[in-house]
Amino acid sequence: MCARKAKHSDESSGFQYCAGHMKRHPAYCCTYSQAIEIQAERAKMQEGAQDLLRAGRERPLLKLLNKQQSILEKAIKKEWGKALSWLSKAVANSLNCWEATIPLYRDSGSQLGVTHHMLHGQACSLAQTITNHCKRGEIQSAIILWRSLFEIEVNMAYIARDTTQVPSRAQRYYDWSIANYFYVNKLFSHETMVEMQRKYQGWNLKHYDGWTAPPDNPKAILDMPKRALQVGYNERNKEAGEYSSLDIYNLCHAYVHNNMFGMLNDPLTPRDRLPNAPSIVGLDTPICLAAISLTTITRLLLDNIPDSGHVDELQSLRKFAEIQESQVLLEIAMVRSDILSPLSGVELSTKFRSSDGVEYTVVPKRRGETQRVRLL
């Protein structure tokens, strides 16, 4: 310690300084033991920084995975490229339809139109995402997303077949979407939520499908499969061994919940592949499903549009949607059979009668196979 009278003390280090030495010494000093601790902490920080740098380096396995993904996407473009191209055109056409109908629904003031337009916009985003997943070979994730697309399809059809009861299905669906937001964010005392509870007294606002119950029986809630059956969807034709969209929707629960059925008894994706791993095999299921659902949703939007002077333009969009869906299915019908899903893609055929009265059924030729012609 300085021989002069100490006037300043550093409690952390235990040193005392006079006023003169305080001008020449740093304000922060430490003892030997504290210096050792500081060096140890700095060593830990440097080690952590080195670990961060090592973790950020591209590993050989990562390079291999990226290379394999690049090869896979090139193979997908070669085998499924035309079908995916038509699906992308269908998505763009659907987006054009959504944009063209904005002023028509806005000016009409119809709750049905507002709700349908909102659902159609969500469907376009989902279809675009499904297309991107298919381009990367992510089959299961694409099928899971299609499950949401099919729910929009069924909900639009269910809302369109409304009765004269008040509040309408469109109004109830819109109100339930608002109520769900308040429940998720725990805003139970918000004035809008209080008004909603008063309006739907006796209803189950917490139930996701509560909006499907009619005003005269608020407890009669319909789940998704029951709504689908009401609007004309069918279950599997067991005699023909065929799957319907509703059947595939129910099978998708295995992917969403990762249950035992999905792990051991998966009918939608090939068995000889790693779970959830990108693959070139089995893309026909999500591509076909997305194309069919997107066309149905676009048709539902246009069928319930208010009268306007844009009939010709909108009819063209409908026609384009139907053509694009047909082209997607045609391209899938020509994909090699060894890269199809367990559902075996789609089988398209045309019939014609020759001049001698013989009727022929022509099936599109799959790549690597000869054209098939059947006599009737």
Image (tube, rainbow, N blue to C red):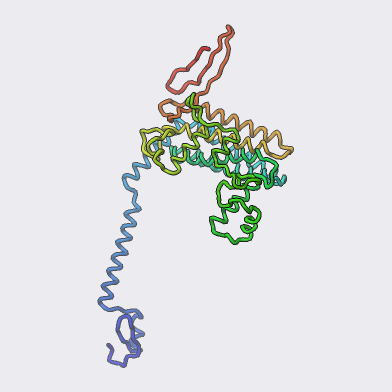
Looking at the picture, does residue 28 appear above or below residue 193? below
Kindly tell me whether residue 81 is visible in this rendering. Answer: yes
345, above or below 188, in the image: above
Q: What x and y, as percent, mark residue 133?
A: 47, 40
Q: Residue furthest bottom?
A: 5
Image-based side of 218 in relation to 287, left or right: right
Residue at the image point whose x is 27% and y is 91% from the top:
3
Q: How many marks?
A: 0
Q: As displayed, is residue 302 above or below residue 359? A: below
Q: Is any part of residue 75 visible from this angle?
A: no
Tell me what residue is drawn at x 62 percent, y 56 percent.
197
Horizontal side, residue 307 vs residue 244: left or right:
right
Q: From the image, which quarter does the N terminus lie in?
A: bottom left
Q: Is residue 168 above or below residue 245?
A: below
Q: Quadrant of residue 94?
A: top right
Asked whether 159 or 216 is in front, the reply is 216
Q: Which of the 4 image quarters holds residue 327?
A: top right
Counting from the top left corner in percent of width and height, residue 340 is at 43, 29
Who's the residue at 57% across and 15% down the image? 352
Across and down, in percent, residue 229 comes to 57, 35
Q: Where residue 168 sits in the image (x, y, percent)?
A: 67, 45
Task: Residue at the far top: name it.
Answer: 356
Q: Is residue 132 left or right of residue 221?
A: left
Which residue is pictured at 54% across the width and 38% down the height?
Answer: 225
